Amino acid sequence: MNQQATETRVGAPDAAQAATRRNELLWRVAITIGPIVASLAIAGCVLLAVGVNPLTYYAYVVDRGLLSPLGLQQTLTRMAPLLFIASGLIVAFRSGMWNLGGDGQYLLGAVAAAAIAPVFVQVMPGWLALFLSFVIATAVAIAWSIVPALLRAYQGVNEIITTLMMSFLGVSFANVLVKLVFLDPGTTVPQTRTLPVDDRLPRLFDTTVTSGLVLGLVAIIAVHLVMTRTSFGLRLRVVGANPNAAVHGGLNVPGLTLAVFAISAGLIGMGGAIDIIGVQGNVRADWNPAYGMAVIPVVFLARMNGFAAIGFVFLLSVLSIGGESAARRLGVPQHFTLVLVSIVLITLAIAEYLDHRFNEKRRA
Amino acid sequence: MKPTPDRPQSQPPIITLDSVTKRFPGVVANDSVDLEIRAGEVHVLLGENGAGKSTLIGMLSGLLQPDSGRILVDGVETPIRSPSHALSMGIGTVFQHNMLVPTLTVAENLALGGDWWRRPRIAELTVRASQIAQQLGIEINLDARVSELSLGEQQQVEIVRALLRDSRLLILDEATSMLTPKGIEELGALMRRLVDRGLAVVFITHKLGEAADFGDRVSVLKLGRKVGEIAPERLSRLDRSELVDEIVAMMFGRQAGDAAVSIPPRSGNDDALLDVRGLTVARTADAPGLEAISFRVGEGEILGVAGIDGNGQKQLAEALAGQRPVIGGSVLLAGQPLDAMDVGGRRRLGLRYLTDDRLGEGTVRTFPVSINYFLKQIGEAPLWRGGVERAGEIDRRARELTHRYDVRAASIATPIGRLSGGNIQKVLIARELADGARAVIFNKPTYGLDLANTLATRQRIRDIAGQGLAVLLISTDLEELLSMCHRIAVLSQGRIVGIVENGDGAAERVGRLMIGLAA
Amino acid sequence: MGGLFSETFVTVLLFGAVTAAVPLLLAGLGEQMSEKAGVLNIGIEGMMIFGAYVGFVGAYYSGSFWAGFAAGAAGGMAVAALMALLCVRLGLNQIVVGIAITLGMEGLTALLHHFQFARSYPRLPAAQVTPIPLLSDIPVIGPALFRQHLIVYLAVAMVFVTTWIYRRTQLGLNLQAAGDKPAALDVAGIDVTRTRTVAVLFTGAMAGLGGAFLANIGAGLFIPFITNGAGFLGIVLAMLARGRPLWVLFGALIFGLCLSLTTAAQVAGLNIPTDIIQMLPFLAVMLMLVLFGRRASLPAALGIPYERGAR
């Protein structure tokens, strides 16, 4: 319909415009904090239902994940792989592709690193061994995304289903590799050979925080800058925002699709590798932290902005570390994190809806 | 199609719109409109694109609610709450874009709307539908899947459906854009038969000629307001050209020559700038194919492509631009074959394509105006250097283009989706014409634009032809083609069935070609 | 114990295939109706796991399997109601909400199970079978196919019920219109939201029932994440079946066969690790998607919320 919107000639800055922008900012903050607060409240009700005092739980999580020095360091360490996952998801989602195979890509990257690093470390300088393990792990994760990528690029098959299926397949395959191929004969607990602590990624200064955190920050900032400032990023965003316009504009959509999957899966695989060579040192059988899905709400909360994502990844890490501790001490299993995180997604979606409706009314 | 002069005097209206107003974000679509609809009368709602006709229809058919004013049915104030409510009051609507489910058969479509727990009353409906069709003199195949029917046939199905529901009022929204000239005549006759049976018909159009030919009563809308009405008594006393003049005066307050024919002069050289030879495109599930398309467009020439929508026009444009794979033939620009080039390559060589789907594929509606100017040049210097965006350059260039092409927007950072259709079109024109254009394909460039923008766009097309560019003008508006093309090709079912020199009698020859007769 | 192709092996294999196929069949039939109506229901895995938990609790505390099934279906419908409210009524993004519901229900059921049963890990007694006379006496396949719990036969019957709905009822027409061209349905006077809600609730009931079957009959207990992708497999079945319920049945049986290879292999004395067997159904899925994915037909309005008068 022909909108004769209030139109003025280009360029007429105004003091009133500055005030509107400030109000806009406040509103933006409100619809980001609002869902978080609402989710805490709703999830708190769930805790009440199973007989746990939510305030005690939240206080414990904050204390353990944020306030205690050791806990804070663990939180910052946990951020490292999560930042990689967030960057991988940002690339995919902004390009309009739903990479839901994060769990499988992460785990296979981790297993690849866990298998290779302890071996390489014995025959070459440490930094080279870690670097090569990192690269190979990334390649493995990328390889795991090729089939869904090709199916989407050339057959138009919906990637939600293909990446999910590959994820289930990948998790099982990773388990097979851990239990049958890379099993460490020297331990009773089924796991891969452990990378000695001294050979892992160095810690930062005097803390127990892994330097993988720095790599994670680099990754997410790099992704943000590429997406917002480069022509490549713009092409991806066009594909994500309007695939028809991408074709019309002469973009190589199948090629870009393959690139997106490769980058997204690669970054997530890097996260898995970092988790092993920086923190865990090995992969235990049946280990699956399932970060791939938990990070999704974070990326939406951050509205796909890399810098904002850093903040929200921090919050998720606090929850993750604090939650692990609470699982041991308070008897509330880690699964609660999933519940909370899913409520955040829904309240955020509702907030966006209200925002949209409010904007419509405002412009009428 | 003039009504007989001794038509019974105005009966009481069956539907009355009383000072109805409807607003959308940023625009008042209907402003205090009064309308009276009577049985036995073809009431034409005339107005250019953007005048508010579709909104009015939306309110009559229950899709929209007025913000103020009242709707009276048989004199009683009755808000029309929903489509089913409208149907129950006997208001049947045939929308511009058809409302049939393509994957169901005609009979199943007619059965849609019954109580969900019953078996579809297909047998019963079949009998009644056949009766109605026969009475109206049209043929419909009830077992055919809707997707297999032509657009004209689909429209007939919708009319039958409206009558099956015992409609008292039939609303036809821009019903003729999908029809051949002969089909339009037949529709006119059909409407006459309907009102003779006592129905009320509201016929919406933006074409003056149709209003003059088919209406008993004409209401003229302009920018959301009703600016005039010609009652049957007056209508029957005027002859066609007087009527047209009067309506034009009502619409524009002056004698406008908007359909004035003005063909840009060109030196008569015969060098083809754009040379298409035997272009063949495969059929797909949702698009017709093209078969051995051949034509040549010289420098400074405007070649029109006429034809009913859906006969391959869009596919032709896409194939030439490089968006659609080609299985035979070749395309040359200034002697250079384009066949191995992708969209970007052809563009750089000078072939430009202005799509009709402005928001669907022409732009990214959430991106700022500035970026939309350069969607087809992502990564090219000097706006990008080494892959990195140079925001200052982009903004500077965007402002330049905005100024030169008179785009009205709050700022170049405004998401382009917020601009009016006319301004979006200006951005697209700026994009395609700036820098190095040699041959330009326009697909329905004035579709959905108000009159001022329509005229401005046509003038711009004439101007670039005057500068020596080759222009391929695809349009379903025959008047538009006649007003500016040197020659007009007719596309029918994926083939060029003839190319006509513009001039006296061109309209008839084109019309005949469109329905399959030799010119 | 017998060899790979002994009678016992085949019988056990087929029996297990049917047992494994039922949840997939129910999920697939349910998802198919949602997709027909234009709703991409990714939350089906969440509906299934919630139905599994509620169904288990229902059967455990009441001692009746049928109570368990009813509870499971109701539980699935409750989750579906949430999905309908958010996606059909409000028009929120179906993918985001679907992921949220799946994650949330997985976490919630795991949480509840921990607090309720983590110490006891109770099991249900074996279910009672209802043999079909004569047919169950056929050697090898008789005991496998026709000596199942009554609910299995009902699940298969649903294939024919849904076929009948789609082909012969007004509801079937409405659903197809809602998926292919909701505007046409609206203009015909039928509430698109209500039609789609019906479809989504049906999906929830079927998924919940499938989950309850999985827990109560398939496994005899509930452990967190027990569905392990069964809901998503249901989506694949619906996608590949192209609107035909009978094809969902065939697909479910094929996947069920892959899943039942674990037990059958053990019977045959083969020692294939569980993890490898677990990969098989997903390998089969990927193979199917590679071969047939392009032709998976999905309704035109899938995943797009309907807005009356939208431009």
Image (tube, coloured by chain):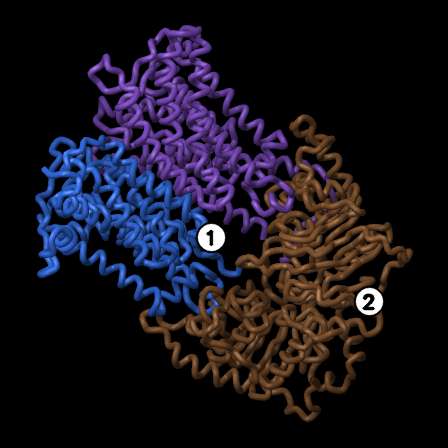
Chain colours: A purple, B brown, C blue
Instruction: Name the residue rendered at 66%, 55% in the picture.
Output: B356
Q: Which residue is mark 2?
A: B501
* Tag 1 residue: C304
Q: Identify the residue at image location x=43%, y=54%.
A: C298
> On the rendered structure, is A363 left or right of B141?
right
Expressed as whole percent of the image width and height from the top left, the position of residue C67 reads: 14, 52
Residue under the point 44% across and 39% down: A148
Q: Could one spot residue C57 in this view of the protein?
A: no
- Check the picture and name the quadrant holding the N terminus of chain C: top left
Above or below B5: residue A284: above
Give the residue displayed 67% in from the left and 73% down from the top: B180
Residue extending furthest toward the bottom:
B6
Q: What is the secondary structure assignment of the residue under circle 1?
A: loop
What residue type is disc 2 on? Glu
Question: What residue type is disc 1 on?
Answer: Ile
In the image shown, does B167 or B11 lie closer to the viewer? Answer: B167
Measuring from the top left, give residue B163's x and y in whole percent.
50, 80
| Rendered location of residue C118, percent (x, y) | 16, 32
Secondary structure, mark 2, is strand
In-image side of B7 versus B505 (left or right): left
Q: Hey, which residue is sitting farthest right in the picture?
A: B267
Gap between marks 2 and 1 measured at Cα: 47 Å
Q: Which of B283 and A345 lies nearest the eye of the viewer?
A: B283
Q: Toward which corner of the image does residue B248 lie, by quadrant?
A: bottom right
Could you classify mark 2 by the number of other residues whose Cα lies within 10 Å: few (under 14), some (14-19), or many (20 or more)? some
The image shows residue B3, relative to residue B311, as above or below, that is below
